[in-house]
Image (tube, coloured by chain):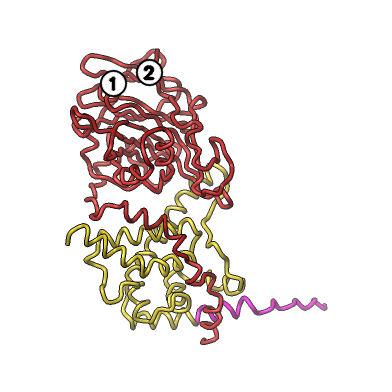
Amino acid sequence: MDEETRRAQVEALFAEHARAVLAYARRRTDHATASDVVSDVFVVALQRLEDVPRDDPLPWLLGCARRALLNQQRGQRRRARLFERLAATAPRSQPERDLSDGVLARALATLGERDREALLLTAWEGLTAAQAARVLDCSTQAFWVRSHRARKRLAAALERNTTTPRTMEPCND
Amino acid sequence: MTDVMTRLAAANPVADADATHASLTGALERVRAAPARAPRREPQAQLVRGGLALAATAGAATVGVFVLSVGTGPSPAQAFPILREHGTDISRLIRRAPEYLASNGFGAPGSFIQALQDAHAFAVPNVSGLEMGYVVESPDDQTLCLTIARQLNYTGPLGTITSGTVDCDPTSTAEQSGFVTSVPAGSESVFAAIVPAGATVSLTEDGTTTSVSVDAGIATGVVPDTATLAIDVAGTSTSYLIPTASNNEVWAWSTRSNAGSTGPTGGSASIGASGTTGASGPAN
């Protein structure tokens, strides 16, 4: 495939899926980083066009976006360690909009990254189980197991977060 | 359990419709500027030069060299062996460099993006987070630039701040005498020099002169105080002053265009304020 054809095909992919990739990234990081993630994803697509599934490329693109975000977060942690030494403050890149449901946000934060993604890929990105499994690079069956377990963990975390702390009874000696 | 998923779906913080095409323009430009084929990765071991241990993961500071000229004489790759090595993308690390270079008469910003995506890496001393250096060759190379950068992320309006130094020289001058840049590293200074093939480099500190190893046309090291670096090319020696850390100028910019502030430590694309530091200009 010549370069012109590759670029044309990637531009078509971009036109169709870039908004979904950007939305995925913006739900998880700040706007500037999300824009970087989008370009990373489509540069990878350009250079590995043969690996992009033609029938349903979105899960492949979101899988790239997920890995790009994980790389960004690792880099931020390294820079944070450097920054801590310089300024005793650890900066972090935050999603541009926080969840308005604070209880839910705290409960989500208790999940591991793969568990959290198993839920969000279906709830926010609207993917089917088969598509979400491809993003997470696992079988559909494994995805179902993980998703089920993650829902239970999230429900338990919500239960813990919403339960009013029990008032201590005064000791009556 | 269904309630959990319903609640989760309702909490979606960004609707797909909010991800507008306008916010994708920059991303599309970067994709268009990228090479259609991935450059072959060079083995990590090739990045360790001059006996310097490659820093583990502590820092994000970077030294870079930009080659921005192509002459009619010997190609820069012939004069500077590091340019023959495979490239690394540093366009995000030093993302304001194209605007800075354009504002200093080196051409349109777009012509530098691809150059930044094909940087050639080398190791620098592992001091104050310094870790790697890069050489970049642009398609229209008329100038050779050395930069040292440190990247820090802030929450709030400044976003990511990249700071450091950059020095440029015509490629023809660099081929005759090489040149040097340096950056503060704690109480010391780290320098990097690009020298043409066959050059020798020596460092004079407190009256003591030692030779500096050159690998692929790059000499780098750390000095605790003001020192003089001499680059000898075909019997002609040129000396460069490496100032004390406190005298090293730095530039800085925010990656967020609406940062608003100006000046060398928070400006938006304000690298030019003190960008070409001249920190390592020829010593008299």
Callout 2 secondary element? loop
Q: Amino acid at mark 1?
A: Ser
Asked whether the beta carbons under mark 2 and mark 1 sit within 8 Å of each other, the answer is yes
**Residue at horizontal 34 percent and vertical 68 percent from the top:** A61
Q: How many marks?
A: 2
Q: Which residues are magenta?
A: A152-173
Q: Which residue is mark 2?
A: B282
Say left or right for A127 vs B139. Answer: right
Q: Nearer the viewer, residue A2 or A83?
A: A2
**Upstream in sequence: badge 2 or badge 1:** 1
Which chain is displayed in red in the rendered image? B
Q: Chain of mark 2?
A: B
The spot of residue A59 in percent (x, y) is: 34, 73
The chain displayed yellow equals A
Q: CA distance from mark 2 to mark 1?
A: 10 Å
Q: For mark 1, give the secondary structure.
A: helix
Q: Quadrant of the C terminus of chain B?
A: top left
Q: Is residue A103 magenta?
A: no
Q: Residue at x 26, y 52 (%)?
A: B35
Quadrant in the rendering for residue B109: top left
Residue B177 bears which disc, if any? 1
Outermost residue to the bottom:
B2
